[in-house]
Amino acid sequence: MLELLDQLKADIINGRLDRGCPLRQQELSKRYGVSRIPIRDAISVLRNQGWLVAHGKAGVMVPELNWKEAEDLYQMRSLLECQLLGYSFPNITYESLGKARDINLRLNACDLSMLERGRLNWELHATLYEVANRPTLFNMVAILNEQVRRYMGFQYGPLQYRNTSQNEHEELLDLLAQGQSDQAIKLLRQHIEVAGQQLVEYLKATS
């Protein structure tokens, strides 16, 4: 099931499944070499995560990417993740910072797929946020980050934001290690908003 989900997500990110066109269970079953039952279950999961949306009475499709949705996502992330990091700060330990640094080193690999990169990026942020002990807020932030992954192809493709993102991760971890909570939250807001604004402007220009 997880392998099938990853295949579908990778094909969505890389544009191998056309946006705005209906997806048929029978066709997907042939494409991925599985029965219609796991396809049905995968579609249900992807609909819940925002990777697919309803089409007609019973069908689904890959949604179009648009700048208004991208803007909503980064604005919500900016508000909620900065609040969550503030709650986390008193509980962040050298152990959690070390774990986050290890993840960031893995993100430096050049051979990662966009899906792997998106998963590791969230894993890094989640390592810092989960110690807040605010499960409701954490789960909402996790949902937003899952939806943002549909846009990864732009941020790591034409926008070439990977190196900037990596450098900001390191700077954020340094600020947290030094106990500079206000500066860390300010940097996190910048980290989310600048990338989001660039994405929005790109989508506007290409729509």
Image (cartoon, helix red, strand yellow):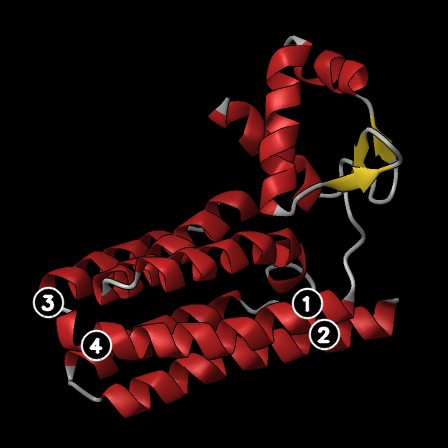
Residue type, numbered disc 2:
Val
The residues bearing labels 2 and 3 have C-alpha atoms spaced at a distance of: 36 Å
Residue located at (82% from left, 22% from top): 24
The image shows residue 89 at horizontal and vertical percentages of 21, 77
Amino acid type, label 3 = Tyr
- SS at circle 3: helix
Q: Position of residue 60 (x, y in %)?
A: 79, 34
Say whether disc 4 or disc 2 marks the residue closer to the N-terminus.
4
Label located before the other in sequence (2 or 3) = 3
Q: Residue at x 68, y 36 (%)?
A: 11
Q: CA distance from mark 1 to mark 3?
A: 34 Å
Task: Identify the residue position indicated by label 4 in the image.
Answer: 89
Is disc 2 surrounded by few (<14), some (14 to 19) or many (20+) residues within 10 Å? some
Q: Are marks 1 and 2 in contact (CB under 8 Å)?
A: yes
In terms of sequence position, does the residue under pointer 4 or pointer 1 come before the other?
Answer: 1
| Separation (CA) of disc 4 from disc 2 | 30 Å
In the shown orientation, is residue 50 left or right of residue 137?
A: right
Q: Are circles 4 and 1 on residues that touch, CB within 8 Å?
A: no
Q: Are marks 2 and 3 in contact (CB under 8 Å)?
A: no
Which residue is the site of mark 2? 200
Residue 206 appears in the figure: yes
Q: Which mark is residue 94?
A: 3
Q: Nearer the viewer, residue 110 or 31?
A: 31
Q: Nearer the viewer, mark 1 or mark 3?
A: 1
